[in-house]
Image (cartoon, helix red, strand yellow):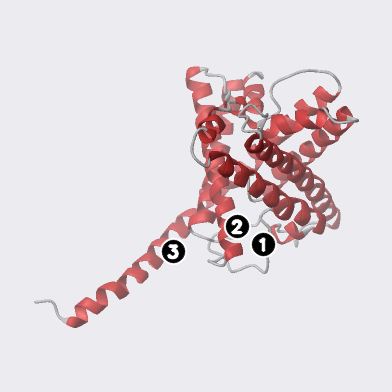
Amino acid sequence: MTSPSNITAAPAAIPAAATQAKGAALDAAGNRWVERSMRFGYIVRGVIYLVIGVIALRLAFGVRGAAMSQTGAIVTIGHQPFGLILLVSVCVGLAGYALWGAVCAALDPLHEGHSPKGLVNRAGFASSAVAYATLLVVTIRFIVAGTKPHSITSYAWITALLAKPFGAWLIGIIGFATIAGSIFGEVIPGMRGSFRSDLDLARRSRSEHRWAMRMGRIGIITRGIVFAIIGIYFVAAAFHANPHHQTGTDGALLGLARQPFGLALLGGAGLGLIVFGVFSMMCARWWRMHVGGSKRSSHSPSSSTV
């Protein structure tokens, strides 16, 4: 017969076991090689945005190329000399960056906690992990089967949602959430420079510190504006019940090109995304991983999300 002390001890052991499991997972994530793979993810993310920016800049000067999207960047990289080797390296980086997002969302090494703001930030990390894991799958398919990625121009998921009850409302909510996240998670932190708390600049030179802040502001604000335009297109697709409204980075940049002085706007956006790409690559050196570390004073999700 089980004694009462054993009955009460069992539930008490569950939190302790969970804490031990989380500690073991954090130790694994803090492994030197795992950390290096996650830092390499910042380099690959930077290369992807750098390529998108170059494609946009070329289009502003009348030179057409691949789609101005992450999948378009993958295609462009694959068509370069030694493209297969480059794509394999991209896969390693995408896996590392997706892993970093999953670690931040599930294990909370940044100590976001369970407050509403903390949960929103962790949800952002989770969505980033899913997005880059999806891009990883697309890249692997491109390598193995030679299947050209078309996911960025596919409206199948929007069409499927619009066919469901309240589907338009859901797309509209996604759009408004994207707009809000872009403004409050990227544009405003970029203007304030609050992303500095995520960077380990204490041991860097004064010149390096200045360039980190300049590139961070320009790049993060630019990407936030592009993502806000993407959100606007989601809202438009929901309002007009039209699944063929252009969405994604490609649609947002093409939308800029159609405005008055559109080519100048597109060129500026291209330059801004190039700056963000360089900033992201440098984050492999500058970024605080915090895995297993102490709680930091503040956090901006701007450079941590997609």
Q: What residue type is labelled 1?
A: His
Where residue 88 appears, x then y in whole percent?
A: 55, 29
Q: What residue type is labelled 2?
A: Asn
Q: Name the residue under label 1.
A: 299
**Mark closer to the observer (1, 2):** 2
| Alpha carbons under labels 2 and 3: distance apart | 21 Å
Question: Image quadrant for the N terminus?
Answer: bottom left
| Alpha carbons under labels 3 and 1: distance apart | 22 Å
Q: Inspect this view and state whether residue 100 appears.
A: no
Q: Which amino acid does label 3 sit on?
A: Gly
Q: Do the residues labelled 2 and 3 touch (CB within 8 Å)?
A: no
The answer to whether 107 appears left or right of 66 in the picture is left
User: Mark 3 Cα within 10 Å, few/some/many (few <14, many 20+)?
Assistant: some
Q: Nearer the viewer, residue 107 or 59?
A: 59
| Residue drawn at 86 percent across, 34 percent down | 265
Q: Mark 3 points at which residue?
A: 23
Secondary structure under the numbered disc 3 in the rendered image:
helix
Q: Is residue 27 above or below residue 139?
A: below
- Indicate which disc, 3 or 1, sits on the residue closer to the N terminus: 3
Question: Image quadrant for the C terminus?
Answer: top right
Q: Within the image, what quadrant is residue 256 found in?
A: top right
Q: Residue 121: which numbered mark, if any?
A: 2
| Alpha carbons under labels 1 and 2: distance apart | 9 Å
User: Mark 1 Cα within 10 Å, few/some/many (few <14, many 20+)?
Assistant: some
Q: Do the residues labelled 1 and 2 touch (CB within 8 Å)?
A: yes
Q: In this view, does 289 lie above or below 278?
A: below
- Indicate which disc, 1 or 2, sits on the residue closer to the N terminus: 2
